[in-house]
Image (cartoon, grey):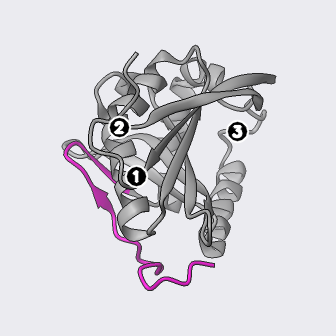
Amino acid sequence: MFALPFFRRDLPALKGDRVTLRVPLTNDYREWSVLRGESRAFLEPWEPRWNPDELDRTAWRHRLSRYREDYAQGTAIAFFIFEKNSGKLVGGITLGNIRHGVAQSGHIGYWIGERYSGRGLMTDAVKLVTRFAFDTLRLHRIEAACIPDNARSIRVLEKAGFRREGLLRSYLRINGMWQDHYLYARIEDDPPGAGTKD
């Protein structure tokens, strides 16, 4: 469980230049299901295989319950990403596998709706979550894993100051197949703009 005083039920929204992040709410279901549904072909190559009931309301309730349980246990925080100007839901980002003690680390994962990709919104969101992890949670290291073919995600991480550290063989089961992933990380005291330059 998060023992730090800033973990309360009323976790404030994180505000960036172009996006606002906040925890998912029950009434986000319709906007979330429409965005995910219309972006399915765009998202599936980079995500675990979708369940047949992936976008059903019952599955949504289970998802929210899991988010709340992870948050209560201090292991993860899920945020939805909203475009600042329009207020529209554009994607999601999670800081998970949060560890304190000697590790003081976490892992980010994210998705964005197809119609919002390529606009720099996810880069803004990754920077916001990274700053939150360092400044508020007092973590030291943030990691992210990325399939080598996912050029868009690689650009996001590198623009957000993450460095490629190596290749994790057969790391995650994505879209039904075990996939290699690049491991990226950012350390608390990395200078701005320190991402990998290929």
Q: Is residue 151 left or right of residue 189?
A: right
Q: How crowded is mark 1: few (under 14 residues within 10 Å), some or many (20 or more)?
A: many
Q: Do the residues labelled 2 and 1 touch (CB within 8 Å)?
A: yes
| Segment colored magenta | 1-21
Position in image of residue 47 (x %, y %):
65, 30
Which residue position holds label 2? 160
Q: What residue type is labelled 1?
A: Thr
Q: Image quadrant for the N terminus?
A: bottom right
Which residue position holds label 3? 54
- Answer above or below: position of 158 versus 93: above
Q: Is residue 25 something one can see in this rendering?
A: yes
Of callouts 2 and 1, the N-terminal one? 1
Inspect the magenta stretch and tell me whether residue 17 lies in it.
yes
Question: For residue 22, what is the image quadrant?
Answer: bottom left
Position in image of residue 62 (x %, y %):
71, 57
Which residue position holds label 1? 130
